[in-house]
Image (tube, rainbow, N blue to C red):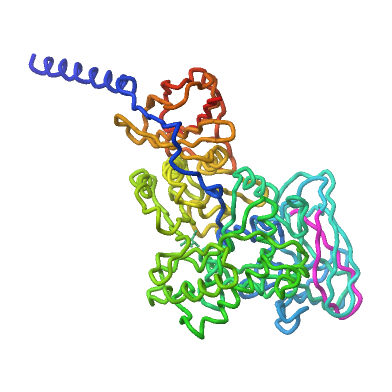
Amino acid sequence: MRSLCCALVQLALLSTTSLLVAQGPAAQPVKLAIDAAHAKGNVSPMLYGLMTEEINFSYDGGLYAELVRNRTLQDGNGPSHWFLHEGDAPAATMKIDKTTGPSTALPVSLRLEVPAGPALRDLPAVENEGYWGIPMRAQTQYTGSFYAKSDGPQSVTASVVNNTTGAVLATATVAVQGGWQRYSFQLKTGAIQASANNRLRLAVSKPGTTWFTLVSLFPPTYHDRANGFRADLMEKLAAMHPAFLRLPGGNYLEGDHINERFDWKKTIGPFVDRPTHPSPWRYHSSDGMGLLEFLEWCEDLKMQPVLAVYAGYSLRGDYVKPGTDLEPYVQDALDEIEYVTGSANTRWGAERVKDGHPEPFALQYVEIGNEDWFDKSGSYEGRYAQFYKAIKAQYPQLQLIATTPVKQTRPDVVDDHYYRTARQFFDDVHHYDNTDRNGPKIFVGEWATREGSPTPNFGAALGDSAWMTGMERNSDLIVMSSYAPLLVNVNPGGMQWETDLIGYDAMQSYGSPAYYAQVMFSNHVGNEILPVVQTGDAPRLFYSVTRRASDGTVIVKLVNASSQPQKVQLALDGVSHVSPSAKLLTLSARTTAATNTLTSPRTVEPVESAISNAAPRFTHTMPAYSIQVLELKTK
Ligand code: AHR
């Protein structure tokens, strides 16, 4: 009897609880009062931009469309990623030759030696495996080239060969003779099955010795730029409508040691004169993405470069003392700015013209170093001051970014970085609400919710979106922000840093849920920040409201990071009319673990719909785990 009674009480309690849960959202909707009559500041027109670097095979094996891996034979010991195909010459050999190359920058080559023997039908060759394959598609033209030297007249046949069947997918033959020269060829595919299961083969027709380097093969690129960018990745970046690109990256700027920094002067001009260099992310950079290519990337996506200059500190702790020792580095930075912005009459502007870009690039921001809070020597105060003084003397209009707060000089902007969990971002969305508006402006130059691997899951998208509402509400102070890193080659061994916005292999790419959140945020933002007052509690609800002054549209961003739907009362004060029909974009998932992958690229993606009950005062119900944008027309 006693237990039956208890069971009944429990049942009653349980049903009350479930009733409460079921009624919870309806009972007391949170109210957001939006002051549509008094903007509290302007949204920075450069709020959303890009930041990445040579990490996770982001450029080589990623954005930079080159298909040949280790094209200059300087990556690793021995001919990494190159293979010998003996064909009908079983005694043929392939090895690295450190005694000959086409230039001082490229002193190394791949030597293919074919001894005299019976007639060759299956031609001996060197083969490159590409970045986890050489992707080939039907009816497509590929542009190839190589530098070669030979000890006698040779015919070199360039072809792409399927690894499984040995089928030749496209082929071209080039006559090679004498000392080092550049040779080019075109490969055109027919009606083939698209696949990356291929190698590039360079075969010789006769016995003899042939040396190769700077072997290159490009597919069609974005905007058909020679030596350009992978189209699918550029399209994904373009969809983010980024206002700027922080270049050339974070750690990649610094290098492990001073001589491994991004030494920009060694990244310009013909590829044959670029010595290439090790990236701090444990692989060698081809420097195909040199300074000018970064700038062209900006041009293609209509982004402003945010130029980070090497400031005398490298990752393993080497630093240059401020004063005379630092002067050459300061001069390098001045030369770099001149290369970017100078006219043809300047020393470095003329160099850019010679490199094929007559027009100077617009430049507003220069960042001095990267994450100099790691420099425990305390030299950044002096280094920043020295760069600041020299750059401002020549370019007073430039805004100079410090990578950590400094006292000796007042920086124009300070770069803050945040790599966090979703929960840490939820708890810190008010981070900048009370920051002194009379101090330096803020650049959130690297940030991400690091949940999900290789790319962020939906929980990370919620953390990111909550954080973005905070940045947007404070975008009178935060002039720029950039998620990092952007790109990851998801093949085994491709990733050095977990949680990257966009994933890909040789053939395909996909945007993570966090990518779609970025697209939603950056494509739907007004130019004025509207104040919002919240009444009532709402678990894990985050918001920001902006207005597009040109047409009066009020853009409401709502993030419901809780597992329950939430009702939100929206009140637009100072507005007499709101069109009942309003555009609604929703990114949502059943669980925080939901994600996108190469094989399921669209599990989580934004869905556009409309609401029909918009008004100066109305109630909106947010689904559980959702990120929404509402566009309210007030005119
Ligand atoms: O984005 C990855 C790395 O994180 C950057 O190279 C560095 O600046 C930061 O520590």
Q: How many marks?
A: 0
| Residue 538 quadrant | top left
The location of residue 515, given as percent across then percent down, is: 54, 44
Q: Above or below — where is 566 with respect to 390?
A: above
Q: Residue at x 55, y 70 (%)?
A: 392
User: Depth check: 368 or 103 in front?
Assistant: 368
Question: Magenta span: helix, strand or loop, mainly?
Answer: strand
The location of residue 529, given as percent across then percent down, is: 46, 40
Q: Would residue 483 be found to the left or right of residue 75 on screen?
A: left
User: Depth check: 468 or 464 in front?
Assistant: 468
- The quarter of the rendered structure image containing the C terminus is top right
Q: Which residues are magenta?
A: 142-162
Farthest residue toward the left? 2
The location of residue 436, given as percent across then percent down, is: 37, 54
Q: Residue at x 36, y 46 (%)?
A: 433
Residue 83 lies in magenta, yes or no? no
- The quarter of the rendered structure image containing the N terminus is top left
Residue 160 lies in magenta, yes or no? yes
Q: Above or below — where is 369 with respect to 296?
A: below
Residue 459 shows in the view = no
Residue 284 shows in the view = yes
| Residue 108 quadrant | bottom right
Q: Would residue 405 be found to the left or right of residue 613 on screen?
A: left
